[in-house]
Image: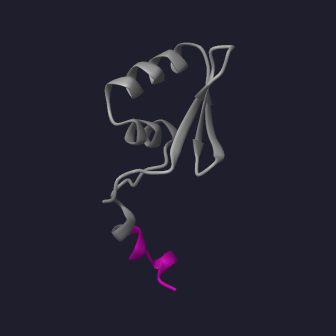
Amino acid sequence: MGAATGFAYDERSDGSVTIFHHGRKAAVLRGDRAVEFLDEVEGGDAQLVMARWTGDYRRGNERVARSHPRNRG
């Protein structure tokens, strides 16, 4: 599994945080969630934290899904 890349975030003056993925808005966090996100992003790998908060990360089920009858072509 590759490392998460392409994420950036912007803290706004109203206390909200906007997370971008490859230049497109992926999530907006406000209030306690924004504070929690900022604490977590400062303490860990920022790219992986942003991937987890936006839900844009691999879940490990890609091979299983490929063999599902609906996806067989």
Q: Outermost residue toward the right? A: 14
Residue 66 % position (x, y): 41, 74
- The residue positioned 64% from the left and 48% from the top of the image is 23
Q: Is residue 14 left or right of residue 29?
A: right
| Count of numbered circles in the view | 0
Against 14, residue 54 (above or below) is: below
Q: Nearer the viewer, residue 62 or 45?
A: 45
Q: Nearer the viewer, residue 7 or 61?
A: 7
Q: Is residue 46 left or right of residue 73?
A: left
Q: Quadrant of the N terminus?
A: bottom left
Against 14, residue 9 (above or below) is: below
Residue 65 % position (x, y): 41, 68
Q: Outermost residue toward the bottom? A: 73
- The residue positioned 52% from the left and 19% from the top of the image is 33
Q: Is residue 49 left or right of residue 8?
A: left
- The residue positioned 39% from the left and 55% from the top of the image is 58
Quadrant in which residue 39 is drawn? top left
Q: Is residue 37 left or right of residue 61?
A: right
Q: Nearer the viewer, residue 58 or 35?
A: 35
Residue 8 falls within the magenta-colored stretch: no
Residues drawn in magenta: 65-73
Against 41, residue 30 (above or below) is: above
Residue 55 % position (x, y): 49, 44
- The residue positioned 40% from the left and 50% from the top of the image is 4
